[in-house]
Image: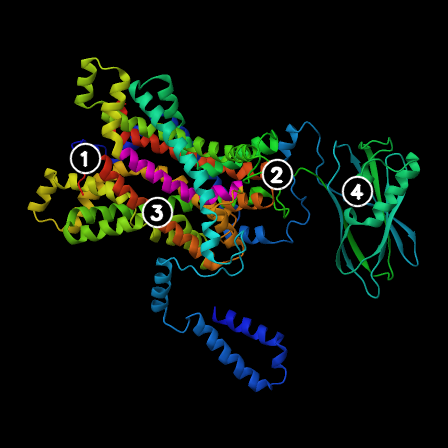
Amino acid sequence: MENIELTSTYSLKGIIKEIFKYKTAKFSLLIFILLIAISIFAYTTMPYDEAKKMWNDSQAWLKNPRNAIPVWWGVFTGKKLPQNIDLKNPEIKVLSESPEVINYSYNFTFNYDDFPTEFNIFLKSAFKEQPPIIKIYWEKPNGDKIFLTEKQVRSENDTFYIGNEFTIEDKLTDYLTSKLGYYPSYPLTVMRGLFVDTSGNLNIEKGNYKLHLEVNKFNKEDTIEIEPIIYGKVYGIAGTDHLRRPLELGILWGTPVDLAFGLGASIIITFLYLILATISGWYGGKIDNIIQRLTEIYMLLPFLPLMIMISLFYKLNIWKLLIVLILLSLFGPGIKTQRAMVLQVKTLPYIEAAKTYGASNMRIVFLYIIPKILPPVIPGLIISIPSYVFLESTLSLFGVLDPTEPTLGRIIQDAFQNGALYKGFYYWVIEPSLVIVLMAISFALLGFVLDRIVNPKLKEI
Amino acid sequence: MEQEIQMNVAMRMKDDPTMRGFSEEQKQNILESRVRNELKRRGMDQPFIIRSIYHLKRALVLDLGNALNMTSDSGSMQVKNIILERIPLSVLLFTTITIIEFLLSLYFGLKLSRNYGSFWDKLVVYFSPLSTIPGWFYGIFFIMIFYSWLHILPPGGFMDFPPPPTAIGRILNVIKHMILPISSWILSFIFLGIYSQKNFFLIYSTEDYVEVAKAKGLPDKDIERKYILRPALPPIITSFALSVISSWMGAIVTEVVFNWPGLGMVLSRAIGSFDAPVIVGVTVIYAYLLGATVLLLDFVYALVDPRVRI
């Protein structure tokens, strides 16, 4: 067992040539290229800081539905789920000149199989003495016109949350009771009351609806912009989260962060191991002793609790976390195995030759030993990339990282915290998880292939 | 930190009715002296290095102090009690997991090393990249499938509420809650575990004395037990101990995902309420657990490996 050759005869170029002989490696390189392409696309369309600002801007997403599932996902439910209905181009009719009363009526067709979630009317107005008063009427496909409410605009930028008004709910209950002859047997909400038919069951009445807004202006020069939105249950290619943010934004801009974190951590830590192991093996004596003892002490450190503790107390963002991670894994178990390789390489003739012609220690360490033991280390480097990506999501799951940064782990944590698993918002967990899983599997496949190439011992088996 | 203390002291003085009689200047003096006392009480007047040594000493003798606002289930605010009452639960779940994983990988590793190149052997190799995904990550999917979709297993926790009346019912109930965490960890571990055990046994089963035993016509069972397993015992024990340690680390996240009321859950709750003494306490306890395991390992090594002499 002592004479197993730990180093391989492949050069880096040879390894890359060899990789393309394996199907799995091609597959993983394809995924890798795809991820890089997505990152480049994301970052060229919008810089990260801007995306981060938008992600955290609570005002930017008001017009999106909350917790809406992706449009393509909705297809699998077998029902035609409602999309967002943004009402535009009203018919404007002046009802009276003084005081000025204008009627805005919006026409739309509703033929979905499920009820919408919310109904808001966004108002932007400019007024002199008194804000305008708005009367809201709802016209069903069967021609019944129901008076919903009368409200005065409260400020220049105001929103009427129609779905939350109890007075409207009462009005709709009254209407249904008069139509059915008895009190509705199902619990009624505003959204149900607006779209339910009069059969006594909870069915959607499909057809042409009309929304009439009678705006009573107190001054001729007052202006008003009205934007009624009926929120759907499906939205966009990736759906939205509890704060109405489209998930594709977080995933597209979070993936490169995770990828860079994993790659950075893995490469830096592996090379630090290499350098320390080589120094330890080459110089021997006291330096060797110190490095070996430090490695043993480091192996006893409770890594994850320490990471959690440090990132909590110092409020780290992901790049500072990378530095802490490197410091905490400076003397890892990898040093031990690599040192064993160095001890073997040390006795090879070409090192002897270098010594005799008077090469300096630095030259031998960095130019002769490290390149020689690099190839067998590379599979480990590739395989460990996913583990750092998962470390990021672990720390996010504990909520100790900067909450404003969109990362894949952060999205999973949001989903988890808001009960996505239990409430059935599966897309919210599956989408970021799928990206991480793809990343992990592709790096693992590549790593295993590399392992087979550079460790010929495994090839026979 | 200093500002926080100052604010706290000022708030307390504002609420204190006995302070009303004093003038503003007197109040300011009292405030300053109280802040100074508070800093001294917390040892903040000492330089950082001395404070560190002091805290290190306290951590070493397991004097973990009191929690800021967390309490143990028995009502104690001592960090030691909060942590100690949860350790058995963590150990129960994760030692069970490690033992199952260990036995499975040992058995299948040995079997596959005896007939490598077979269909099952290749299957294990193909599936081994799945092991880069940690157990808790599979756990999220398992909850989704077995709880939210199929409704056959609980999503987490330790026992149903209300607990079943009989003791056997309670044990079965706990086992039911353990199925998902255990299976998610096994899925994450098993392929790479078998793969590496197999490679490991292959090295031992190509030794000359195994060939001799085969030539002598010994039954397979004897060859496996006496000629392969016995000499491989010390490294196997090492890998077992190391996987116990790593399971405790991984436990932190898994417990949060599965709501298992163990040490990881304590840590998660402490993070939620920013209870610094508890967080430090958990870290110290983990360090101790690691150290104790490694120490124990050395003794066991001396027992099973005849080459090691004390």
Circle 3 residues within 10 Å: few <14, some 14–19, many ≥20 = many
| Mark 4 nearby-residue class (10 Å; few <14, some 14–19, many ≥20) | some
Q: Secondary structure at mark 2?
A: helix
2 vs 4, front mark = 2
- For residue A422, the mark is 2
Badge 3 marks a residue whose secondary structure is helix
Do labels 4 and 3 touch, CB within 8 Å? no
Between tags 2 and 1, which lies in front?
Answer: 1
- Quote the CA–CA distance across marks 2 and 4: 23 Å
**Mark 4 → mark 1, Cα distance in angstroms:** 77 Å
Residue B33 visible here: yes
For the residues labelled 1 and 3, the Cα–Cα distance comes to: 25 Å
State yes or no: residue A443 in magenta: no
Label 1: how many Cα within 10 Å (few below 14, some 14–19, many 20+):
few
Chain letter of mark 4 equals A
- Above or below — where is A83 with respect to B118? below
Q: Which circle, 4 or 3, is nearer the viewer?
A: 3
**Decide: marks 4, 1 in contact (CB < 8 A)?**
no
Residue B139 is left or right of residue B49, and the answer is right
At label 1, the amino acid type is: Pro
Q: CA–CA distance between discs 3 and 2?
A: 35 Å
The residue sitting at the left extreme is A356
Asked which secondary structure carries label 4, the reply is loop
**Disc 3 with disc 2 on a shared chain:** no
- Coordinates of residue A38 in the picture (x, y in percent): 49, 40
Position of residue B160 relative to residue B110, above or below, is below
Q: Which label's residue is closer to the chain start, 2 or 4?
A: 4
For the point 49% across and 50% down, the residue is B266
